[in-house]
Amino acid sequence: MASLTRDILIKTIVAEEMKLCDSLDYKEQLQKTYHKWEHESSKKLCQKFNKIEKTKNTSKHTKQ
């Protein structure tokens, strides 16, 4: 399995959350969502990613 980076985790999470976006200003919502997740801990990113992908990655499996 290829190493996951914070960037990949963030983009995957943001893409998943934006699927349900019904905001009239998609770009603004995208920026807010990305900003929210780029400041989360690696542990929280992995937990959210695991829920989306149904995997069991930990922050030890990610590269900065």
Image (tube, grey):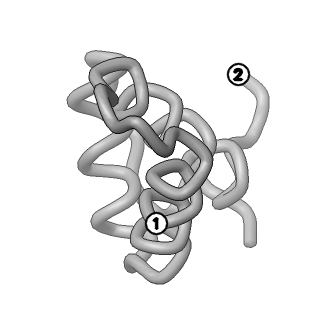
Q: Amino acid at mark 2?
A: Met
Assess disc 2: are there few (<14), some (14-19) or many (≥20) residues with their C-alpha within 10 Å of its C-alpha: few
Q: Residue 14: where, in percent of width, then height? A: 48, 42
**Residue 8 shown left or right of residue 39 in the figure:** right
Left or right side of 25 for 8: right
Mark 1 or 2: the one toward you: 1
Residue 18 as seen in the image, left or right of residue 8? left
Marked residue nearer the N-terminal end (1 or 2): 2
SS at badge 1: helix
Give the residue number, with chain letter if any, for mark 1. Answer: 32
Residue shown at 51% from the left, 39% from the top: 26
In space, the residues marked 1 and 2 are separated at their CA atoms by 30 Å
The disc at residue 1 is: 2
Does residue 18 sit above or below 47 in this rendering? Answer: above
| x, y percent for residue 61 | 57, 52
What residue do we see at 40% from left, 72% from top? Answer: 36
Query: What is the x, y in percent for residue 58?
Result: 39, 53
- Farthest residue toward the front? 24
Q: Considering only vertical position in the picture, is 54 above or below 36?
A: above
Q: What residue is at 43 percent from the left and 58 percent from the top?
A: 33
User: Secondary structure under badge 2?
Assistant: loop
> In which quadrant of the rendered image does the C terminus lie?
bottom right
**Amino acid carrying mark 1 in the image:** Lys
Based on the displayed image, in which of its 4 quarters is residue 51 positioned? Answer: top left
Q: Position of residue 31 (x, y in %)?
A: 58, 61
Callout 1 crowding tier (Cα within 10 Å): few <14, some 14–19, many ≥20: few
In the displayed structure, 55 sits above or below 64; it is above
Q: In the drawing, what numbered circle is on residue 58? A: none
